[in-house]
Structures are given as structure tokens and as C-alpha cells.
Image (tube, grey):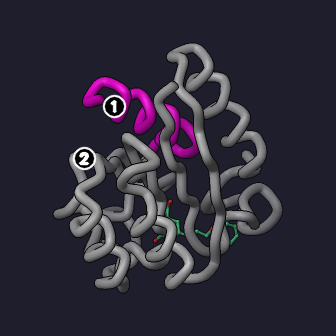
Amino acid sequence: MKMILVIHGPNLDLLGKREPAIYGKVTLTEINRALRKAAKKHKVTLKIVQSNHEGEIVDLIGKSRNKFCGLLINPAAYTHTSVAIRDAISGSGILAVEVHLSNIHRREEFRRQSLISAVVSGTVMGFGAKSYTLGLSALLDLL
Ligand code: CA2
């Protein structure tokens, strides 16, 4: 069975618990449930990881090449800062889709640049929790 790696970046474990005005009321557990349901329908397996640590995310991506056929990632704040995660994705050669809950282009100036977008197949943003299932669907189409 095809295996897809899903990575949630820093602080996404707080979803639904803090700042609902910005990120909504949906929790990460609910997002993961929706992803697993969609994956089951398409007969793929997901490994889902949330990490607050850049190096851990780099390691996971580095080891992903022979284990996973695709990567769905919300790098969260690292989107705007992490050359290391960008290099890990481009170095791994894995097919990747970037997702964001919010439309980063409608937010503060410092969020408008993604260092990740240039090394992924595509980015889905601005649809709240639905960005994840849309992103998974796009990734499955590419596989
Ligand atoms: O819109 C997105 O998905 C972001 O990746 C979310 C990140 C943010 O830094 C990016 O600019 C855009 C923030 C994730 C942290 O989420 C929280 C949820 C509740 C309370 C605090 C943070």
C-alpha cells in the first residue's frame, strides 16, 4: 500500500485551543481524522507527525525517500524561515504538496514569502482545515 508522510509544523498542536479567530475551531485531531478518512477511501496509508523542531522535520524528510511516495506538509512558521526544510525537500526528491490554513498573502508582510513553495509541486492555502484534504487530493492525483 502507498504510504504518505504528513508533517504538521510548530504550534499546530494548538489548533482549536488558542487563537480561534485566526485559525478556526478545528483541532489537529479532527484534521488528522479527515485526512485518514480520505486516505482510506483512496487506499493509501498516512504517517502523521507534528513537530515543533526544525531539525526533527529535516531528519524525517531526509529519511522519507525510500519509505514514502509523497509528502503533505504545513511547515507553519518555518515556511518563512527554513532553508534547512527547503533543502531537505528538494534533496529528498519526494513529491510534495505544501498546505496552509490561512492565505499567507493576505496576512502580515513577513508571512507573504514561502521558502518552501519553490521546491514543492503545489501549494493549497486559505481554506482552513479543508486545505489539508484538498492538498491530499492534489498529491494523490499526482502520484
Ligand atoms: O496558515 C497556516 O497554515 C500557517 O502555516 C500557520 C502557522 C503560521 O506561522 C504560518 O504563517 C501560516 C501558525 C501555526 C500555529 O497555529 C497556531 C494555532 C493556534 C494557536 C497558536 C498557533
Q: Is residue 118 above or below residue 143?
A: below
Are the residues flagged by discs 2 and 1 in contact, CB closer than 8 Å?
yes
Q: Is residue 136 above or below residue 141?
A: below
Is 136 part of what is drawn in magenta?
A: yes
Q: Is residue 130 left or right of residue 70?
A: right
Q: Which residue is mark 1?
A: 138
Residue at 54% in and 58% down: 7
Estimate the x, y position of residue 121 in percent, counting from the top left.
Answer: 21, 47
Estimate the x, y position of residue 40 in percent, counting from the top left.
Answer: 62, 20
What label does residue 119 carry, if any? none
Residue at 67% in and 51% down: 24
Q: Which residue is mark 2?
A: 122
Q: Is residue 42 above or below residue 114?
A: above
Residue at the right extreme, as displayed: 17
**Could you give the CA–CA distance between mark 2 and mark 1, rounded to whole angstroms?**
8 Å
Q: Is residue 33 left or right of residue 55?
A: right
Q: Would you say the magenta stretch is mainly helix, strand or loop?
A: helix
Looking at numbered disc 1 in the image, what kind of residue is underneath it?
Ala
Q: Camera-side residue: 44 or 138?
A: 44
Q: Quick one: label 2, few (<14), some, or many (20+) residues within 10 Å? A: some
Q: Is residue 30 above or below residue 143?
A: below
The segment highlighted magenta reads 127-143
Estimate the x, y position of residue 112 in percent, counting from the top left.
Answer: 29, 72
Residue at the front extreme, as displayed: 66
